[in-house]
Amino acid sequence: MKQPSHHQIATYLTDYALSELVKYVMEDTNCSIEEAMEHVYNSPLMPALQDEEGELYVQSPAYLYEMMNNYQRK
């Protein structure tokens, strides 16, 4: 069986983190999925999360959610 590439792993983990972040926003704010997605995807955290070299995607979604909220407060 062929091992997944670094890019494939990064993509999978980033997608998982994003889906969890959207869920957290929906739960905390009682907003729609569309509003939660807009909130997450427009967050200052997004460029850092999508940077494969920074490897932020390996952090837990809960940690990333706290980071996202801290960015928003500044």
Image (cartoon, helix red, strand yellow):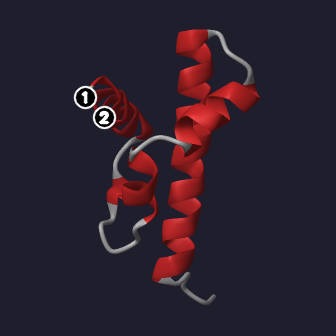
Q: Residues within 10 Å of mark 2 (few under 14, many from 20)?
A: few
Residue corresponding to mark 2: 71
Indicate the quadrant containing the N terminus: top left, top right, bottom left or bottom right. bottom right
Q: CA distance from mark 1 to mark 2?
A: 6 Å
> Which residue is pictured at 35% across the width and 29% down the height?
72
Depth check: 41 or 53 in front?
41
Along the line of sight, the residue nearer the viewer: 42 or 3: 42
In the image, residue 28 sits, relative to residue 38, either above or below, namely above
Give the amino acid at mark 1.
Lys
Asked whether the residues under the numbered discs 1 and 2 touch, taking CB atoms below 8 Å apart as contact, a structural biologist would say yes
Query: Considering only vertical position in the picture, is 26 above or below 52?
Result: above
Q: Total label count?
A: 2
Residue at 33%, 74% in the rendered image: 53
Q: Horizontally, is 60 left or right of 13 in the view?
A: left
The picture places residue 7, in percent across and down from the top left corner, at 51, 79
State the residue position of label 1: 74
Q: Residue at x 54, y 24 (%)?
A: 24
Name the residue type under label 2: Tyr
User: Which of these two is toward me, 42 or 18?
Assistant: 42
